[in-house]
Structures are given as C-alpha cells and as structure tokens.
Amino acid sequence: MKETATLNQLSAKNGIIIAVVIVVLSLVTHFINPLMPYTNFWFQIGMFVLCIGLLVYSGKSIRTELGGYWSFGDAFKSFLIIALILTAATTLYNILLMTVIDPGLSAKAAAAMEESQRSMMGKMGMSDEQVDEALAKAGNMEEKLKITPKNIVTSFGVGLAIYSVIALILAAILKKNPPLFKSGVEE
C-alpha cells in the first residue's frame, strides 16, 4: 500500500512540474508571438519533443525512486496520472488564454492558420479553387478554436487519448522488472 501511495505521489509531483513547465513556456511564447503555436510547424514539433523528453525523464526518476524497478502496470498508471494532470492543466490554461488573457486570439489564430494553409497549398501547386475547396472542407477554424463546452470536452478528451497512447508506449519502454534470480556467485 505504501508503494502505491509513493507511486501516486511521485506521479502527481512530476505531473505538476511538467504541467507548470509547459504552461509557462506556452505563456512566454504567447507574449513573444501569440500566433507561433498555431502557424509554426517546427514550434509544434519542438513542444511535442520537449513534452516526450520531460515524460521520459520523469519516468526514469520515478522508477529510480521506487528502487529501480517497476512493472508495466505501475509505469502505465504513473504516466496516466501525469497525463491527466498535464491535460487538465493545459485545458485550463487554454480556457484562461482564450477568455481572459487574449479574448481575440481565436479569431487572430484562425486567420493566421488559414493564411498559412493557403500559402502551403499554393506551394504544393494547388489552384485557388482547390485551396478554397480544401479550406471549406476543413470547416470554420475560428469556431473550432473558440472556448465552448463542446470544444473544451473535445480538447480534453483528445488530449487525454493522445497522452494515454504515449503513456502505453513509454510504459512498455521504461518498465523494468526485478530479476527472477539473484545474479553472481555467493561466497
């Protein structure tokens, strides 16, 4: 029972630390260039890689704190706790960002994303008619970015699903069962 409590505490602590790092970095980025997270593909990849790196580091540190071994189930549970905290924190941050910090951001981001997509499709050789058709199929981006109960639940669900898949993968990679037999020769 004590080991489970320790696992939960370590997971919660690491989840909060990762969430704070991601939210602070996102906030700093917003004040530098509020449209960068919506229009810069390399920024999005960088944030994803950073998040995976932080998850791996926290997983290794939790495993070390638990004595160097943890089962797949314990590893998955730990990553799932971290994912839940991270998803909740980023969802709350996005609500605050879009409603309090920068209420006009959804309109500005939607326009910037449309322009970025138009430019990309134009470089791919698509005609203006094809670009307009593709953007029409994609739907109204501003509506997708607005803070509504449906969008909040969808964002939280999709985020948790993505982090759950990552949690499965990381748990499989970082699990380490104790040896069945003691190695070495006893004297």
Image (tube, rainbow, N blue to C red):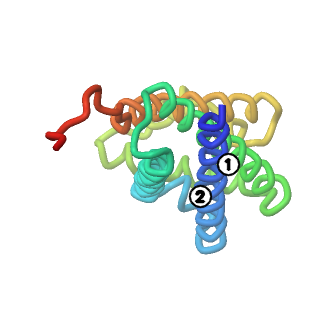
Which residue is rendered at x = 37% and y = 39% of the image? 174
Q: Mark 2 points at which residue?
A: 22
Residue 146 seen: yes
Q: Which of 70 and 182 is in front in this view?
A: 182
Marks 1 and 2, how far apart at CA: 8 Å
The image quarter in which residue 27 lies: bottom right
Q: Is residue 101 left or right of residue 32?
A: right
Label 1 neighbour load within 10 Å: few <14, some 14-19, many 20+: some
| Amino acid identity at mark 2 | Ile
Q: Which of 22 and 17 is in front in this view?
A: 17
Rendered location of residue 4, percent (x, y): 62, 34
Q: Residue 126 carries which label?
A: none
Three-letter residue code for mark 1: Thr
Q: Is residue 13 left or right of residue 180?
A: right
The percent coordinates of residue 34 (x first, y second) are: 63, 64
The residue furthest front is 187
Residue extending farthest right: 100
Say if 167 sits above or below 121 in the image: above
**Numbered-mark total:** 2
Query: Which secondary structure lies at badge 1?
Result: helix
What residue is shown with label 1?
Answer: 90
Quadrant of the snapshot with the N terminus: top right
| Helix, strand or loop at mark 2 | helix
In this view, the residue in front, 146 or 119, is 146
Q: Give whichever of discs 1 and 2 has the lower sequence position.
A: 2
